[in-house]
């Protein structure tokens, strides 16, 4: 954003433009994250969901959950695993991880880096 402000904006940029540029940067970075996850998931981490389910069920057993609670958790996780196989849902859920943080950082960055042109005294 600072580079945009200094090179394209001539040293000034309003908050709205700064927010738009920062949000676009966050969106592009988040989409790159999603693309990397989709490649990783579909090539060498395709058993991720199975391992995750096993881990969560073992954690519930260790915590002393009843067999009924474990069965309910397994059924819930099985439904989630079926949903997660859909590439669109997988991508959407992955996008939700970094994007909110990126947008918060965009908001803060826009506030810090935005500058207005200074008005001349008496004019």
Image: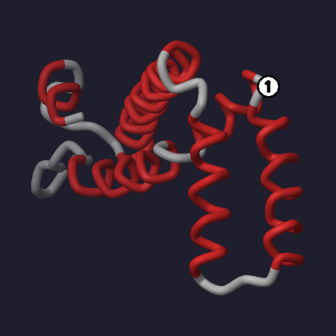
Locate residue 58 relative to residue 31 in the image: left or right: right
The answer to which image quadrant residue 72 occupies is bottom right
Q: Residue 33 at what x, y percent from top left?
A: 44, 28
Determine the residue positioned at 52% across, 47% down: 97
Secondary structure type for disc 1: loop
How would you rate the neighbour count of disc 1 (Cα within 10 Å): few for under 14, some for 14-19, many for 20 or more? few
Nearer to me, 91 or 109: 91
Is 85 rendered above or below residue 75? above
Number of numbered labels in the structure image: 1
- In the picture, the quarter occupied by the N terminus is top left
The residue carrying mark 1 is 86
Does 1 appear above or below 106?
above
The answer to which image quadrant residue 96 occupies is top right
**Image x and y of residue 8, in percent:** 22, 19
**Residue 74 pos. (x, y %):** 81, 58
Above or below, 62 relative to 74: below
Q: Residue at x 44, y 20 (%)?
A: 36
Foreground of the two, 65 or 12: 65
Color scheme of the displayed model: secondary structure
Residue at the (86%, 66%) spot, across then down: 71
Taking 17 as reference, is 45 left or right?
right
Position in image of residue 104 (x %, y %) = 42, 56
């Amino acid at each position: 954003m600072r580079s945009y402000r200094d090179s394209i904006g001539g040293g000034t940029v309003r908050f709205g433009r700064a927010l738009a540029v920062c949000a676009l940067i966050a969106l592009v970075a988040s989409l790159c994250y999603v693309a990397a996850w989709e490649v990783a998931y579909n090539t060498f981490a395709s058993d991720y969901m199975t391992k995750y389910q096993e881990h969560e069920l073992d954690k519930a057993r260790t915590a002393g959950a009843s067999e009924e609670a474990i069965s309910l958790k397994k059924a819930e996780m099985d439904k989630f695993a079926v949903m997660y196989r859909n590439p669109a849902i997988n991508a959407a859920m992955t996008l939700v991880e970094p994007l909110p943080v990126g947008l918060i950082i965009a908001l803060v960055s826009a506030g810090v880096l935005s500058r207005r042109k200074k008005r001349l005294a008496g004019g």
